[in-house]
Image (tube, rainbow, N blue to C red):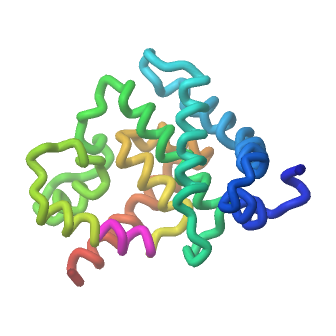
Amino acid sequence: MNYKDFNDYELLDHIYSCNENANEIIIYKYRPLTINLAKKLIKYCNGGIDLNDLIQEGLVGLNEAINSFREDKETNFGTYAKLCIERRMYSLVKSTRTYKNKILNESISLEDEEENNIDRFLIDNSNNPSNMVEENDYQEKILSELNNQLTDLEKQVFELKKNYFNYKEIAEILEKEPKVIDNTIQRIKTKLKKIMKEM
């Protein structure tokens, strides 16, 4: 089997039919994407992991995508797989950063309570033991609705921002101008504000 002979959905069908060869092929297909992302992210690690660690974490994300993807999702498998790969790798990078517990960088205003409520959704606070079950349920509903409304670029920026990357780092990783990242975060916050008012 050659991945060029099959589309992702055919490969997934073979995988779900317990064809191990198909699983190897889809991993082979997405390995270059994983390696490229790892090469971009390795410079943001503060020691403790190497390039191969990042690649392996990305491949774990790919396996998660294979196991959890459903064709009724509004996104295609390639986009979904890329997001799962990125999430795993961003999380690993975050764990190596000395300022991982820092609240949003200086570019985001925390001037008032409304801004503060919005900003808490832009950081990953899942490890905070003080979170109440009710608050987690509320956040999950909001984040689910937000995810439905975000563009692919907004999803990438959102995921990086949750993992404590600053504007400049996000711009470098996504190969965008910092102003584009700034505008993207403002759009995310606008969508988030609207969703929070409606819930």
Q: State yes or no: residue 97 in magenta.
A: no
Q: Quadrant of residue 61?
A: top right
Judge whether 6 appears above or below 3 on screen.
Answer: below
Question: Where's residue 83, x and y in %?
Answer: 54, 54
| Residue stretch in magenta | 142-148
Q: Is residue 72 above or below residue 32?
A: below
Q: Is residue 143 magenta?
A: yes
**Image location of residue 11, percent across then percent down:** 76, 59
Q: Is 141 situated above or below 25?
A: below
Q: Which residue is drawn at 45% across and 60% down?
A: 183
Side of 52 where 48 appears, left or right: left
In the current view of this chain or complex, which residue is farthest to the front?
Answer: 18
Q: Is residue 172 at all visible to an observer of this figure?
A: no
Principal secondary structure, stretch drawn in magenta: helix
Visible in this render: residue 123?
yes
Q: What residue occupies the far bottom of the structure in this picture?
A: 198
